[in-house]
Image (spheres, helix red, strand yellow):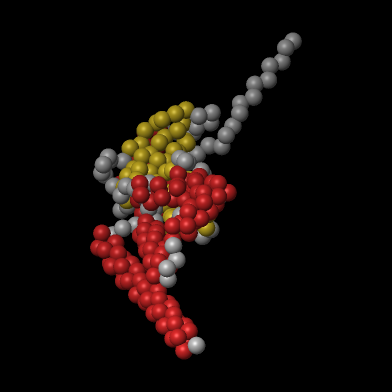
């Protein structure tokens, strides 16, 4: 009887040490993962990595390292992880088949983040939706529009769509088309446009000087196209200013912007 008690006590002690060992692996492993993530965060800050890409890497490393810690703890308990890994592999395949569309978005998110097609903070257009990129996660790209709406686009759509990035270059060219009446002086109108542009502090002379030429003949107006370069952050301000100021100068100088009109000729047969 004493021998049985001794064996039972020894077994409990051994099991207790095994549990303690597994618990220590979990606790130390968790804090080791936290320490590694902090080191990675500091490294990413030094290389100025995109915020969304940084979050993606940190999440991936966090999950992978915690899985390794968990498997190590199970091994310490004497539980074979071979069968567990096989079961998890089968479950992953089943989930992958059920969530193939979602996995397409995840793959799209990884492609966007790694290829840097666009970055957080860029002003872009995707499928007619425009806005500033506020976040790129594994599933979606989120845009904040100028009127403060949030547009959430699946990454599978974003990666396979035409994307226009308005923030990729420091300078943008502003194109405005003005229509004047056929009986107005087009040379005078061009000079008014250029004089107004040259007075504006946001208008640039590089990489090209401002351009104003007759570019078409509409049904009711002669079309004059203005092309002027500016810093990308000044694009909308410059556009609105020039529209208002050139319209005011046209009015002062008798240059009219005609309405659409149709000439109707009635013939009367005798």
Above-or-below relation of 12 to 60 = below
Residue 97 shown left or right of residue 135 in the figure: right
Q: Residue at x 47, y 57 (%)?
A: 83
Q: Quadrant of residue 28?
A: bottom left
Quick one: 6 or 101, which is closer to the camera? 6
Q: Residue at x 35, y 46 (%)?
A: 115
Is there any visible trace of residue 20 in the rendered image? no
Residue at the right extreme, as displayed: 270
Quick one: 152 or 144, which is closer to the camera? 152
Residue 198 x/y as whole percent: 30, 46
Residue 247 shown left or right of residue 196 in the figure: right
Residue at the bottom extreme, as displayed: 2
Quick one: 35 or 210, which is closer to the camera? 35
Above-or-below relation of 207 to 263 = below
For the C terminus, the quadrant is top right
Is there any visible trace of residue 19 in the rendered image? yes
Residue 186 x/y as whole percent: 40, 33
Quick one: 240 or 55, which is closer to the camera? 55
Q: Residue at x 45, y 48 (%)?
A: 107
Q: Residue at x 44, y 57 (%)?
A: 82
Residue 204 x/y as whole percent: 29, 47
């Amino acid at each position: 009887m004493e021998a049985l008690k001794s064996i039972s006590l020894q077994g409990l002690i051994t099991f207790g040490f095994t549990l303690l060992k597994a618990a220590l692996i979990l606790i130390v492993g968790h804090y080791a993962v936290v320490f590694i993530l902090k080191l990675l965060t500091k490294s990413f800050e030094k290389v100025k990595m995109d915020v969304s890409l940084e979050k993606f890497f940190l999440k991936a490393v966090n999950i992978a390292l915690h899985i390794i810690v968990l498997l190590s703890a199970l091994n310490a308990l004497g539980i074979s992880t071979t069968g567990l890994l096989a079961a998890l592999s089968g479950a992953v395949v089943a989930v992958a088949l059920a969530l193939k569309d979602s996995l397409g978005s995840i793959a799209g998110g990884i492609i966007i983040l790694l290829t840097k097609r666009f970055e957080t903070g860029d002003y872009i257009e995707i499928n007619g939706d425009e806005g500033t990129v506020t976040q790129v996660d594994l599933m979606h790209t989120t845009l904040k529009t100028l009127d403060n709406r949030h547009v959430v686009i699946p990454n599978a759509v974003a990666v396979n769509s035409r994307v226009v990035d308005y923030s990729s270059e420091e300078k943008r060219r502003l194109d405005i088309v003005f229509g004047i009446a056929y009986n107005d002086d087009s040379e005078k109108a061009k000079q008014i446009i250029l004089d107004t542009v040259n007075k504006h502090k946001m208008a640039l002379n590089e990489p090209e000087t401002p351009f104003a030429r007759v570019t078409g003949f509409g049904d009711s107006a002669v079309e004059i196209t203005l092309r002027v370069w500016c810093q990308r952050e000044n694009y909308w301000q410059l556009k609105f200013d020039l529209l208002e100021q050139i319209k005011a100068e046209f009015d002062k100088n008798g240059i009219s912007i005609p309405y659409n009109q149709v000439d109707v000729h009635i013939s009367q047969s005798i």
